[in-house]
Amino acid sequence: MDLRKLFFVVPLAIGLMAHADETFSHRVVAEEATGTWCGYCIRGIVAIDELVAQYPEDFIPICVHAGDDPMALSSYPTPMSTESLPLMCVNRDAGTVNDPSKMATYVNIQFQMVPEGEISFTECVLSDDQKNIHAEVSSRFDHAANGKTYGIAFVLVENDVYHPDDYAYMQMNAYAGGDLGEMGGYEDLGNYILPSDIKYQYVARAAYGDAYGYEGSVPDTYEAFEPFNFAQDLDLPIFVDNVNNLQLIALLLDENGVIINADRFSISGYENQEAEWTEPEFSQPNDEYAKISWPDGYKVELVNDAAATLVVGENEYTLTYENHDISTYLNDLFVFFPYEAGSIADGSLCHFSMNVDCYTLLIDGVKVECQDLDIQWEYGLETNIGDGFSYDAVYSDGVVSYVCVPGYFVDIRTTAELTLERDGVLVATYGKGSIAEDIDWDNFCETLSVTLDGGDISEMGDYVLTLPASDYWLMSLEGEIIESVDLVAEFTIQSDALSTVATDKAIKDVYYSTFSGVRVSNPQHGLFIKTIVYQDGTTIIQKFLLR
């Protein structure tokens, strides 16, 4: 059976007739930021279900999972924040970002408006190996080219995502018991909806094209109601459960990234292919461990009694999961060099082997038939820092946050030590071998937060907090361990820190302002003043210089 199937082709005659048709189909897109860990996100599920019932053909929902959620995407072009959920927006208009309870209002408003253009699929083809989709669309506007830049993008969603035996797919339910009122019947369910009792719909699996669409996807010149075509090959994520439950959504975007109109195509009629073993890639830093990586979307897990053999030169060592000699993180397997190996000379031949029974490999919860691992390499490969790495050092209310640009992660060594200086003089150290006590950290995190002791920052002055490059690992999104740099945060305190204010004083007002006098609601970086006004009239002012 030839799995490469032409789903839908618009005959040429219809394309020619479209010029005479000056009425547009109109579809509205609503994107919801959600998470299995978010009990209040039930509001979004209910709102979407109601709108799908009201507009079954023309309403297009997309659920963007975020946070500690097995369906979360690492990146997605949306004006919504994915940190405080639930949220939604309609047609990617920042002015519609709101609680999902407002979704129907904004959607109904959009359906009352007349779009300036339309888009429709003319071809959608899934490759034989089910690894990519060839998509072609036809678009047109109600006006001739006017110098504005438009674009076309795509989103892939999957319906009926169901993992009954994986508790990572359990959905929290804040409406259990009915104390918060009725919510589409979810008030009759428990605080946790078991994975066997829920199927997730409209799950965003991939976004193609940036926030403004593919460059050149809309021509510079066109006439009113004259159709033009755009074609694009799209890679299918490997963590898709069932290709027959996929929908490809085409978006026509204006110069601000707002959705003008959309279309969708449902994929069906294919035999699902079994997840296949793929050879992992090997990478090695120049210090104390090596890394074995599978492609994004795979997840590797060790069994409790896993053991492996590591040969370095003529010396053989036994590594165990129990002693943390080997460990996993998402699609990466880490092999730590034993302490008794001592200093390993560059060029030493290393050999790692582990039986197939010692680990499992999964794609979105589905196990892959694995093979024995047998990898050899020479110790001492050189790695260099990526050209795109940078970070923001942000100070706020006694907390310093190092925020890596997207695509990079940090992992703190257990022996790490940060230094805090005031006016060039050492004030305090943080870490001292008990890093978890002093630092809010997680393995390979994008943001490292350090909570400073109030007494250490109680005096006015210029402060510098430094994490040496030697005290953490830096990893790229592609899984490459790269050379670290010193992480430095500089900030200035020009009055007493908050910790010196009596805790029993009632706060009347808290506000921020820039030095030009402009108030801002919640500044994240820059030069600004924070003013705390207490009921007794006391005013505390803090000046922060953030870089």
Image (tube, rainbow, N blue to C red):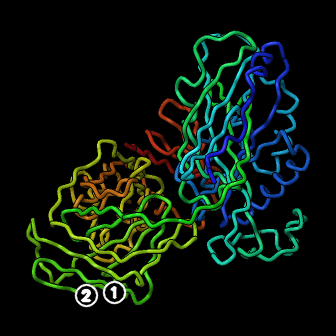
Amino acid type, label 1: Ala
Give x and y (percent) for residue 334: 33, 72
Q: Does 231 appear above or below 296? A: above
Q: Nearer the viewer, residue 135 or 348?
A: 135
Q: Are marks 2 and 1 in contact (CB under 8 Å)?
A: yes
Give x and y (percent) for residue 421: 26, 57
Mark positioned earlier in the residue sequence (2 or 1): 1
In which quadrant of the rendered view does residue 197 lie?
A: bottom right
Quadrant location of the C terminus in the rendered image: top left
Q: Is residue 535 visible?
A: no
Drawn side of residue 517 relative to residue 443, left or right? right
Q: Secondary structure at mark 2?
A: strand
In which quadrant of the rendered view does residue 73 lie?
A: bottom right
In the picture of the structure, the residue carrying the numbered disc 1 is 307
Q: Does 77 appear above or below 346? A: above
Q: Nearer the viewer, residue 47 or 334?
A: 334
Q: Does 28 appear above or below 539? A: above
Q: Nearer the viewer, residue 526 or 325?
A: 325
- Alpha-carbon neighbours of circle 1 within 10 Å: few (<14), some, or many (≥20)? many
Residue that sits furthest to the bottom in the current view: 305
Q: Residue at x 21, y 57 (%)?
A: 425
Residue that sits furthest to the front in the current view: 1
Q: Does 79 appear above or below 327? A: above
Amino acid type, label 2: Thr
Quadrant location of the N terminus in the rendered image: bottom right
Numbered circle sitting on residue 318: 2
Give x and y (percent) for residue 504: 60, 67
Drawn side of residue 304 relative to residue 138, left or right? left
Marker count (numbered): 2
Q: Residue at x 75, y 43 (%)?
A: 30
Q: Is residue 509 visible?
A: yes
Q: Nearer the viewer, residue 10 or 380?
A: 10
